[in-house]
Amino acid sequence: MFVLALIIILGVALVAGGLWFAANPGSLNAEWLGWQIETNMIFGLIGLIVFFVALWVVWQLVLTFATMLGLRGVKTRGNLVGAAKGMGEAYAALRVGRGGQARVEAHRARRAYRDPVKCPATLMEADGYAMSGEAEAARDLYKKLLDNHDTEGGAIRGLLELAVAEGNDAEIREYTERAFFKVDNPVWAARPALDEAFRSGRLEDVEKPLQVLEQSGQADADEMRRLRSDVFLKRAEAAKASGRKGDAVTLARQAVELVPESETAVDTLARMLAADGKARKAEQLVQDTWRKAPHALLARTWRDLAGGKDANALATRMQTLAALNPDHPESRLAAAEGAVEAKLWGQARTQLQPLITNQPCMRTCLLMARVEDGESGDGAKAQDWLRRAVAAADGLGGVETPAAPGTGIQANAA
């Protein structure tokens, strides 16, 4: 309604002005370099308007040619100095984590450029948005910068970091693939690509990020062996799921050969060997690993390989395993748990005694609670150990060694 009223008012004003000029045409005389122009005021105004329109068209043509030559925007030395200062201050702000200030300074530098895609400060402005939590604004700028060869790599990295923060696997896959194709040795894309490939089960995509990590020196030899061992384990699980038992055993064995002390790899191979009727080889594998690197998961593997033994036989079996590395805390915990299951309270207490002198871990406290409750029925002491177990679990006690899933200790904790 307002717009309609404004149009009517302007129309009336134009008509009234036209009628007034028609009644009072006046005259306009101009002389310049021997040229003399005589006309009435109406034609003079029309000529003036035409002149300014022509001037504007010429100016637009000049700007168009300047843009084609890459000169548009930086019009004076002052523009250039201001842009450089803004970019410097934006970079400094990014270095100290002040995303908001970086965004403002980079935007000021960008004013010297007509096209933001051509301005190097735009990338810093997008980083500033991302750092200050304005993900959508950052994403919009990053996507614009994908069209500029000079800023494409930085834009891909920015979009990848946003995707990782949001847990968007589809975009992580898209931008890591683009990084490997467009950017030389993109180390920053390797780990997100590797993690996403493991999560999605696309094991055929892990080799490229592994190569990038290895060539860049961002992963040492030990880490590379662990990563490749994880790949073999994943492939072994996939082979087992598809019924290819022989391939599964071969792949699991390769994982163990890469990282012999890996409890996960040893557990996987041992269980596959046992399922294939090679229980003795499975037991030997667990024993060899226990001598070098005892772990709660291997204690569970050793226990499960025994099958349906009674509690006393199981306690003896756990003592056999513990004897291979008798002073290690995991050996004492494994032997103590077997003794508790068999109600051999004195034997369990003997194994746990060296572990309670300082700050015992949660598993030790839970086992001691069962010993106090089972040996003497002293509920007060058992409750005290349970409280200490809670404190240890909250980080107030000793360092906790993760228990294997399904152990008697965890069952009591629940």
Image (cartoon, rainbow, N blue to C red):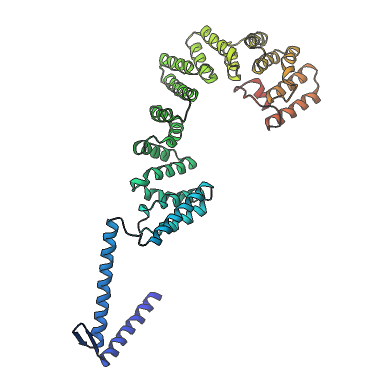
Q: Give the vertical position of 20 relative to 171 (above or below).
A: below
The quarter of the picture where the C terminus appears is top right
Q: Quadrant of residue 363?
A: top right
x and y percent of residue 296 in the render? 61, 19
Q: Give the vertical position of 111 relative to 389 (above or below).
A: below
Residue 125 at least partly seen: yes
Q: Quadrant of residue 210?
A: top left
The quarter of the picture where the N terminus appears is bottom left
x and y percent of residue 49 in the render? 27, 78
x and y percent of residue 115 in the render? 35, 56
Residue drawn at the location 25% of the way across and 64% of the way down = 61
* Near-viewer residue (119 or 138): 119
Residue 1 at least partly seen: no
Residue drawn at the location 65% of the way across and 24% of the way down = 410
From the viewer's perspective, is 275 left or right of 144? right
From the viewer's perspective, is 341 left or right of 42? right
Q: Give the vertical position of 107 relative to 316 (above or below).
A: below
Q: Give the vertical position of 78 relative to 210 (above or below).
A: below
Residue drawn at the location 74% of the way across and 22% of the way down = 369
From the viewer's perspective, is 24 left or right of 395? left
x and y percent of residue 177 in the render? 37, 36
* Near-viewer residue (353 or 72): 72
Q: How many marks?
A: 0
Residue drawn at the location 25% of the way across and 81% of the way down = 46
**Residue furthest out toward the top:** 280
From the viewer's perspective, is 140 left or right of 321? left
